[in-house]
Amino acid sequence: MRYAIRAAFFDFTSRLNDMTQASQHARYIEEGLLLINQGKIDALIEWEDRDQIAEWQHYTYYDLRGKLIMPGFIDTHIHFPQIGMVGSWGEQLLAWLEEYTFPAESEYQDTAFAEQMASLFLDQCLENGTTSALIFGSVHTGSTEALFAAAEQREMRIIAGKVMMDRFVPEALCEEATESYQQTKQLIERWHNKGRLHYALTPRFAPTSSPALLSVVSQLKREYPDVWLQTHLSENPQEIAWVKELFPEHPNYLSVYHHYALTGPKSVFAHCLHLEDAEWQCLSQTHSSISFCPTSNLFLGSGLFNLRKAHQHNIKVGMGTDIGAGTSFSLLRTLSEAYKVQQLQHYSLTVTEAFYHATLGGAVSLALDDKIGSFMPGKDADFIVVDLAVTPLQTLRQSRCRDIWERLFVLMTLGDERNIRQTWVNGRCAFQRHDNISS
């Protein structure tokens, strides 16, 4: 359980409050030594300084020169029961839910099927370099149990919860508020803070949540103040108009959640594409977080996320693949889409800021930066081993790069899951790619 790994390393040494300072907090070590003990980071040092820690020679040694090691990716918004409907054609949000999402999620009432899909889902995460995620389950208790059990087996640090919804969904997916309370309470008691597992209260979104259900979510949040909360916010103009019809007593979409005390430091709101000024201010004042999901926002034609405005309000932002409206588990592909979305709004997303949001920034947005997201001593040893050039085009472009920042940008814009050679979780190799594509 003690390992010494020699390679190049990239991470961030502290959380960022000003994204213009991202490069000043980024750390690149061209030839370093990472020491891991019992699943935790002991130290990251320059190779030439290795003799300052004499005991490293008693660790199991891996020579990975030629590879870049960085913290594992953190996905702040992804749907477990939507893996089977990725790439479903032709609809925007509300029609897409009716046509594809609800039928797909109905399959998860079969626990054996859910167990099979949980293994596939988490293996896809690991293959793409995602070591931690904030995950939506289905409405079924059994499927959520299956997800937690599969994550426990893989020693992954995840936050997840069964979806809560009691109206405007097919009968097979609809629950009573009291039933939702009891089932969620049992799941919290069984799984929250069990090893590396955490629970998130998961009302799907305001339209499928009656006032009675939102009151139940609020009650659970009071009873278990250290659990997380995840939901959707202002993804689609038709959705927003629907919320205003259903909750006319509230001035805006976010105020519905805020009224039930569902905002806060462990609350993560996905999308946030069409916020009013008061909503930006509320997210900031309550220290809530946003999950930026560029791939799904483009796929469903929902809109463009205003990252600059999030920074102006000092709101924490993480990256989300949003499988299954998102079309890839790869956060490299997701960052590439994020760059293009910001270009359309005349904001140049730097490579350092992009990788911050996918690693330490994601951990900050999930209130887990004391445990994951960088190579600081004492943190979990969750990381990925990256080959920067696995195709002829990547090899050509990498050969023309002048420094590590250009090389990382090429990785971000041309890279995908093939660049992930190994994924380590809790100090052990949980995935290794066996192919002949590496250059």
Image (tube, helix red, strand yellow):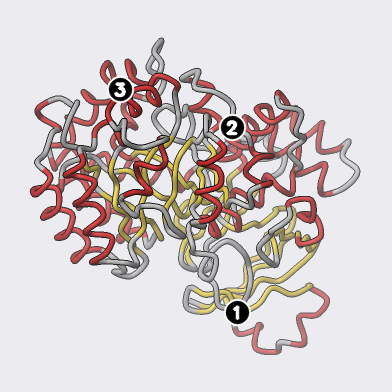
Q: Please, is residue 426 above or below residue 252 in the view?
A: below
Residue 190: give x, y in percent of width and height. Answer: 19, 65
Residue 246: give x, y in percent of width and height. Answer: 27, 28
Question: Which residue position is annotated with label 1?
Answer: 42
Question: Which residue position is annotated with label 3?
Answer: 97
Residue in view at x 27 percent, y 66 percent: 224
Query: Distance between the Cα atoms at labels 1 and 3?
Result: 46 Å
Mark 3: few, some, or many residues within 10 Å (few <14, many ≥20)? some
Please tell me which of labels 1 and 3 falls first in the chain: 1
> Quick one: which residue is furthest to the front in this view?
249
Residue in view at x 67 percent, y 36 percent: 390
Please state, as top left, top right, bottom left or bottom right, where the C terminus lies in the image: top right
Determine whether, in the image, residue 431 is placed left or right of residue 141.
right
Residue in view at x 71 percent, y 58 percent: 10
Numbered disc 1: secondary structure? strand
Name the amino acid, label 2: Phe
> Quick one: which residue is furthest to the right in this view?
402
Q: Please name whichever residue, 173 or 153, is drawn nearer the observer in this view of the structure.
A: 173
Numbered disc 3: secondary structure? helix
Residue 23: give x, y in percent of width and height. Answer: 80, 55
Name the amino acid, label 3: Leu
Mark 1: few, some, or many residues within 10 Å (few <14, many ≥20)? many
